[in-house]
Amino acid sequence: MNPTERITRSMRIPPTRAGTRRLMRLLCLPLLTFLLTAGAWQVLPARDFTEAFRRTQGWSGADGTYSVPLLDGRTLWLFGDTFFGGVLPGGQRSPETFMARNSVALQPGREPRDLQFFAEPFHLERPGRHDEWFWPYHGVPIGSDRVQVLLGRFRAIPRDDAFGFRQVGLDLAVLRLEPAPRMERLSPVPHFRSTPDSVTAWGNALVQEGPWTLIYGVRDSQAAPGGKSLLLARAPRGHLARFGTWRFFTGEGWSRDPEEAAILAEDVSNELSVHRDREGQWVLVSGPADLSSRVLLRTAPTPHGPWSPAQNLLTAPEAADGVFAYNAKAHPSLSDPSGLLISYNLNALEPERVIQDADLYRPRFIRVRLEPGRGCLPESRRAGPIPDREGGPR
């Protein structure tokens, strides 16, 4: 069995036709070597973060790319499907490469350095299970060494392309960080909804705001083009696991019934971010509902809207010939006056291509600003002491 067949089979995706033509390495593209101005928005490459996640040993690529600021100044990164293994000089993944259904990384300070990666802390019966698995949504810290993370539970379904999966549940996990990240508890979230043509999940973005944890959800109406809609719930801060305390925004007030949640915005992606900037406005960053590879930004005066029309900050320059960008989100705790840090994920419609060219399956980062010192940036974050750490795959 050749390496392509072995890795593709581990992904439970039917192998595509073998081809000898290689995609020109995206590293050689003039990737964001320009300054893009859309109205007053300035979009610049964030090469420090992009290069930090371009790795040739251990963790070698993933999607997801949520960030959670921890109470001691560190950052927890949450990823979905992840490749672990080497990358050969020609850019191919090495034969020993395997895929984990999720991974996490710990970043000790504000700079993307000394990252430590850990494979599949969220699993069902066993790590590496590929017929049913967890992909993480967002999380919030609940102490110095624990984080609550909402997990989408997914199951494989028969399809002949890279989208042979469906969300079948939602769980709340407690992730303990010391001495290495591991899952302590897992609780099914009763507010998850699934019908033959629609899935409603929660935790696609989380925001700590005063006495509340704001819980953004997405209703994915799979039969309707662009039918991914933003919803909002809240729970008392520190009590996400008390599901009976969740209340759902109806457009006029708060209800116990998740079925009464109002649609706040349409044409969003399944993964997204929301934060409040230093000017007091709320900022929503997402992709579109389709695979058109755009990075969209909306603003609102309150966490529930009304949200402005989506502004297209960027169409990913890497997106062409079956390569697409998706699930853009902001990382406000890692932003500074140089701009709001935003990531987007890259992938290919043919699974074989992300094996033959490792650079096709890694997050990319940009910085966005309106004017120097203003626009979309959160209040400054104060970092606490950073403990020394050792171990974990690099």
Image: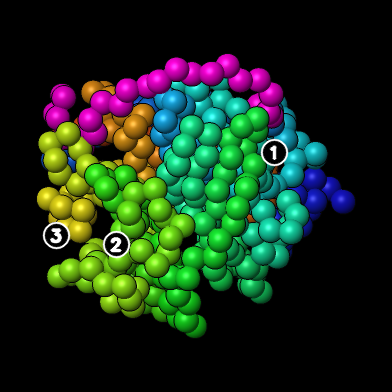
Q: Amino acid at mark 1?
A: Phe
| Distance CA(mark 2)–CA(mark 3) | 12 Å
State which region is magenta: 371-394
Q: Residue at x 31, y 45 (%)?
A: 208
Q: Is residue 382 magenta?
A: yes
Q: Residue at x 59, y 64 (%)?
A: 154
Query: Where does the C terminus fall, quadrant-wise?
Result: top right
Rendered image: mark on residue 232: 2
| Distance CA(mark 1)–CA(mark 3) | 42 Å
For the rendered model, the colour scheme is rainbow
Mark nearer the N terminus (2 vs 3)? 2
Rendered image: mark on residue 84: 1
Count neighbours of disc 1 (C-alpha within 10 A) and say few if under 14, some if 14 to 19, many if 20 or more: many
Q: Position of residue 46 (x, y in %)?
A: 38, 27
Q: Left of 22 or right of it: where is 199?
A: left
Q: Position of residue 96 (x, y in %)?
A: 80, 39
Q: Is residue 145 magenta?
A: no
Mark nearer the N terminus (1 vs 3)? 1
| Distance CA(mark 2)–CA(mark 1) | 35 Å
- Label 3 sits on a secondary structure element that is loop
Q: Main secondary structure of the magenta part?
A: loop
Residue under label 3, please give it.
Answer: 306
> Do residues under tags 2 and 1 come within 8 Å of each other at their CB atoms?
no
- Label 1 sits on a secondary structure element that is strand
- Outermost residue, bottom side: 196
Q: Amino acid at mark 2?
A: Leu
- Label 2 sits on a secondary structure element that is strand
Count neighbours of disc 2 (C-alpha within 10 A) and say few if under 14, some if 14 to 19, many if 20 or more: many
Q: Amino acid at mark 3?
A: Pro
Residue closer to the observer: 316 or 17: 316
Q: Residue at x 34, y 49 (%)?
A: 237
Query: Residue 309 falls in which quadrant of the image?
Result: bottom left
